[in-house]
Amino acid sequence: MAIVIRRLEENDEAENFDCGDDALNNYLKRHAWTNQQKSSIGVSYVALDEDAPRTVLGYFTLAMASLPRDTFPKKYVRGLPPYDLPLILLARLAVDRRFAGRGLGHALISEALRISLRVADEVGCRSIITDAYRDRVSWYARYGFVPIEGAAATGPQRMFLDVRTIRAALPR
Amino acid sequence: MALKTRKKRIEAPAPSPRRKTKFQADLAPAEDRSVRLLKEELQLSSNTDFLSDAVALFRWAVSERKLGHRIMSESASGERKVLLFPRLERVAPDLVLPRVEIKWTGRELESLAELVSAGEANRPTDALIRAMRD
């Protein structure tokens, strides 16, 4: 199976996509295209098999976010640049459960990190954040994401990855 | 002195003849076959009855989605399939749309500020190195 990852297109087939999570399934089926094409608030990238180049096997969505400088606790503000803090939000990442365990998640996050690095190089961005399901925290941690302390115990865990860490992982 | 009030006779408007709308559609051969097959299965003899039933079904589906209800089928074994029909999804209310809203607690902001203002970033993990070199 040769996997291709590219931007979501209007005619991609996502109706049968099932990652086992309704929110992630519905986002892809109902909102990903509109958010990308009409609202331009996030871009989704899909993993496809070359032999069935319309059927979505997995996807991730990236969006830009920022935090106003004055939202940070005062003792840290002095050490931060005098601008809002630009962030990339890894908003979704899911693999169809029929294709789990074949390295699709690794391929998707690799591409998400490469794109993030390009964005950071071309536009400027300090870090990537994601809200990980609790049972996925260790998976993100493998890629260097660090838990941001202070989240509610029951909700998703917000995680952080410094762009400098990604850059350091590039081949020299 | 009693006042006589004049009773005004209000004539009911003459019923206008009910206008019927003619519906004409150009169907591709495959669609035409589908319609014929459906009419046969539903034992409908006329296109008018077919259209009328189809409209009733569509009207019900639209009203359900407008309420935010999902439409699904359930097999004898309990397996459920949710109907996702793009045109129907457009009438679904906004309140069920997922939103990406980033809320930060004070502690999260403090933790993020610590991470961002760190002099040196963490070293990349093996998995990250593989991800960037694959």
Image (cartoon, rainbow, N blue to C red):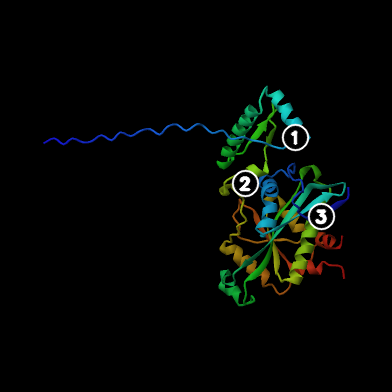
Give the answer, above or below, for where B59 lies relative to A58.
above
Residue B31: which disc?
1
> Could you say where residue B20 lies in the image, as x and y percent from the top left?
56, 33
**Alpha carbons under labels 3 and 2: distance apart:** 28 Å
**Alpha carbons under labels 3 and 1: distance apart:** 35 Å
Q: Secondary structure at mark 2?
A: loop
Q: Secondary structure at mark 1?
A: helix
Residue placed most toward the observer, B81 or A78: B81
Q: Which residue is at a point 86% across and 63% down the rendered structure image?
A: B133
**Alpha carbons under labels 1 and 2: distance apart:** 24 Å
Graded by Cα atoms within 10 Å as few (under 14), some (14 to 19) or many (20 or more), the crowding at tag 1 reads few
Task: State which mark lies toward you, 1 or 2.
Answer: 1
Looking at this view, name the residue that lies furthest to the left: B1
Q: Say what amino acid the circle numbered 1 marks.
A: Glu
The image quarter containing residue A92 is bottom right
Residue A119: which disc?
none
- N-terminal label among 1 and 2: 1
Residue placed most toward the observer, A65 or B126: A65
Q: Say what amino acid the circle numbered 2 marks.
A: Arg
Q: Which residue is at a point 60% across and 73% down the rendered structure image?
A: A76
Graded by Cα atoms within 10 Å as few (under 14), some (14 to 19) or many (20 or more), the crowding at tag 2 reads few
> Could you say where residue A157 lies in the image, as x and y percent from the top left?
65, 56
Residue B90: which disc?
2
Q: Say what amino acid the circle numbered 3 marks.
A: Ile
**Callout 3 and callout 2 share a chain:** no
Q: Which residue is at a point 65% across and 61% down the rendered structure image?
A: A148
Q: Chain of mark 2?
A: B
Give the residue at mark 3: A5
**Callout 1 and callout 2 share a chain:** yes
**Callout 3 and callout 1 share a chain:** no
